[in-house]
Amino acid sequence: MMRRKYINQIGLIALSVVLLQPISSFAQDGAPITPRAAVAKQTLREVGLWGINAQIEGQEPLPSDLWQDADGESLGLVFRKIGTDQRFMPMQTLLQRVLFSGGTAPNTDEYTALERFKLAARTGPLNSSISLLSQLPDNISDIPTSIAIADVLLMAGRIDEACNIVNQIRSADASQALGKMRATCYALNGEYSAAQLAIDTVPQTGQIDPVLQWMARAIANISAGSAVSTIVYRGEDGMQIALSRKLGLFPNREALDKTTGAALSAIVNDTSPARAAVMLRAGSMSLITSGQYNDYAKDVVVIEVIETAVPPAASDVPQVSGAIIEPPSEVKPPVIGRNIYDLLYNARSFNDWVALSGRAKSQIRQVAGLGPIENNFLANSAIINGDVAATAHFLGQTEPLPWQDLARALMEGGENNMAIQRRLEAPATPKNTRPIAVSEAVLGWSAGLRGRGLSELLNTNLPSGVMPAAGTMALLDMALVRGSKAEVALLSYLALQGLDPKTADIASVARVISALWHVGLEKEAREMALYVLMARNVELAPPPRTPPARAGNTRPAPRPAPAAPRP
């Protein structure tokens, strides 16, 4: 208990301070092959590899000084440690913007610089990854980087280009990644015996590799031209996507849950029965814009209009000579867009809700005729969308919750000196205890909102949660002192990697937000604070309860009708 309290105190203090032989048969035209000859080039900037950048649709690049004052050793470590388990959506977007923004080079070697490109190849979006990697000079001989380039080209269906790059790799050293890539290229080019030999000779560490086993079955099925063994879709990298496409496989829910980054963005336009689920997952991982999602879904979701009529009371029905004359029923205003509310309320997760809210932004504005509880819920979608007018409209038809005023202030920007004070002065309820109120105020303070009440940090024990790695947080503090935007952003991503926005330690999250704000990423800090605040408060429909199946009963339990959320 004392140790937990001590750690929390330290966090509050820091917060306040602010990868066989070369393949000979891939070249089909007999012409000399340059590894990246078919890919457009741009002149390398004087700042070297760090000056290379690529555009991401719907996102602005970060300032050209983002890499300044970064510690090279720290950058290399972070590039290698960053993975795909990131549940904070603003961190997903920020990682993309950092990796694809070029600028003045930090004091690092070429190996560290190439780590950025390899991470960008995994992160996506795919088109941006291809654009960034295509600008690497041809004299780069790093094998893992060449494999990364080949892999993103496989994702894009550019098989000849990808396999030409693999053909150029001259290495006597066997590695799993190179062996798998060669086996994939052999199979895709119809050289099945060579593919089987290559996959059989991939070095193994002694443990069973499920991906290697899957690739062996895939190559066997492709070679036989039929399903000689049971196989399901895999799409975690370009090799798996290319083999799955060759087999005509489609992703299921389990496969989608394992598909992230550039690999996920590679399949958003694939014709597939699972495309709706693919688009939703891509939207919830910041791999497509809300506009791209809406363009896909605009003919799928339409606004429903329900006309309602209220029959008159029995006493109001006149009788003439024993005959009953029925007056016209009272017509109430139509209910418009109840299906939009149901779509949002029944989202599978908070991130899905964010993606669906962005997709349905224009439809949300048309919803009318619902009750105050529904209007309050729809106001949350308007807030996360940054829709000021829709927020005012829906909140004007309901009683705003204590945290919604603070969320609105974060959305609108500015200092809003009263938002935090009003949050702290809200009456206490079981859902609005003092620690909760102060923890939400901390999010606002950390994102640059001004307001009285800082003494509450000394008088209130904040709710504790899952802590980030202490070493990562220490590196974050050091990067903040140096003022390195990119390093602070990358370490923030790494600190929150694997954590849940609802259960992560709030003081640690606030330290991350404060670091972003103080290093000059004010807009990103506010977006992060708003996201966390809403992730902890927005209530979605509970998942359907499935009762235990009785013997002989194979019929699935029906899903209950959605209930209205409780504010």
Image: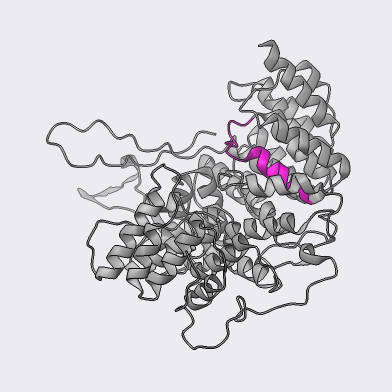
The image position of residue 453, as x and y in percent, is 82, 25
Q: Quadrant of the N terminus?
A: top right
Q: Quadrant of the C terminus?
A: top right
- Reply above or below: 146 against 159: above
Q: Is residue 207 above or below residue 132?
A: above
The coloring applied to the image is one colour
Viewer-proximal residue among 196 and 47: 196
Percent x, y for residue 493? 67, 44
Q: Is residue 290 left or right of residue 517?
A: left
> Which residue extends farthest front?
172
> In front here: 325 or 228?
228
Residue 213 lies, in percent from the top left, at: 35, 52
Q: Is residue 167 above or below residue 72?
A: below
Residue 286 occupies quadrant = bottom right
Q: Which residues are magenta?
A: 486-504
Q: Is residue 119 at least partly visible in the picture? A: yes
The residue that appears at 23% across and 42% down in the rendered structure is: 556
Q: In the rendered image, is residue 304 in sight?
A: no
Query: Viewer-proximal residue, 234 or 372?
Result: 234
Instruction: Say left or right for 342 vs 14.
Output: left
Residue ID at (41%, 42%): 207
Q: Is residue 503 magenta?
A: yes
